[in-house]
Image (cartoon, rainbow, N blue to C red):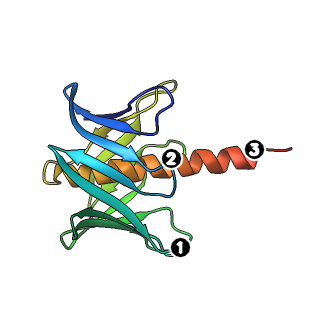
Amino acid sequence: MEAVPQSLFSRDYDVLENSRKIADIDMAWWGERADVLIDNTTYKINKQGFIKQTFSLLQGSQVLATARKESLLSREYVVEIGGTRYYLKRKSWLHRAMSLSNDITSLGVIRPRGFLKRGTIVDLPEEITLPVKVFVIWLVLLLWRREKNNNAAGSDSG
């Protein structure tokens, strides 16, 4: 599975499996939220809170998954799906790849497509539903965008 930008300057992504589009991520221009379209069903991704942020994947009013930081200093997100906790964190401080794990082992990885290519390669477990996989992909894309914006702001020496 992979997520690729819809065009050169797009913030929106197509999620592909075997080169076939299976989902559409419409990233909001303002704020950290998105609409996801899968099989003519729209899912919403919203953010609640300012300091202790929680991201939620919604189908109508039903919460399918949430993600939040355990603490302000942590770079790890806890993703809750139906009462099961997963942990999303960087595989290594050297690389941008993110690992999804349970309490015991790594279950999957989301990593950049390559040095000059935008998008991601996604390897997540079968037991996670497609809408939740897309939610995790969106969260990784958001974290990478935040990191890029923070690096750009920090490198501005005026």
In 3D space, how far apart are the residues under numbered discs 2 and 3 (Cα atoms)? 16 Å
Crowding at dot 3, Cα within 10 Å, few <14 / some 14-19 / many 20+, comes out as few
Q: Dot 1 lies on which element? A: loop
Position above or below: 17 against 53: above
Image: 58 above or below 96? below
Left or right of residue 30: residue 59: left
Q: Which residue is the site of mark 2?
A: 144
Q: Residue at x 34, y 47 (%)?
A: 137
Q: Nearer the viewer, residue 144 or 21?
A: 21
Q: Viewer-nearest of labels 2 and 1?
A: 1
Marks 1 and 3 sit apart, C-alpha to C-alpha, by: 25 Å
Q: Relative to residue 98, is residue 20 drawn left or right?
A: left
Q: Secondary structure at mark 2?
A: helix
The type of residue carrying mark 3 is Ser
Earlier sequence position, callout 2 versus callout 3:
2
Residue drawn at x 30%, y 58% as measured from the top left = 44
* The quadrant where residue 77 appears: bottom left
Q: Earlier in the sequence, mark 1 or mark 3?
A: 1
Q: Residue 49's spot in the image, x, y percent?
A: 48, 75
Residue designated by label 1: 50
Residue 26 lies, in percent from the top left, at: 37, 45
Report the disc number at residue 137. Answer: none
Q: Which comes sooner in the sequence, label 2 or label 1?
A: 1
Image position, residue 100 (x, y; %): 32, 54
Label number found at residue 155: 3
Residue 15 picture location, percent across and down:
28, 37
- Counting other residues with Cα less than 10 Å from the Cα at mark 2, is it few (<14), some (14-19), or many (20 or more)? some
Considering depth in this image, is 84 or 11 the residue closer to the camera? Answer: 11
How far apart are the alpha carbons under marks 2 and 1?
Answer: 19 Å
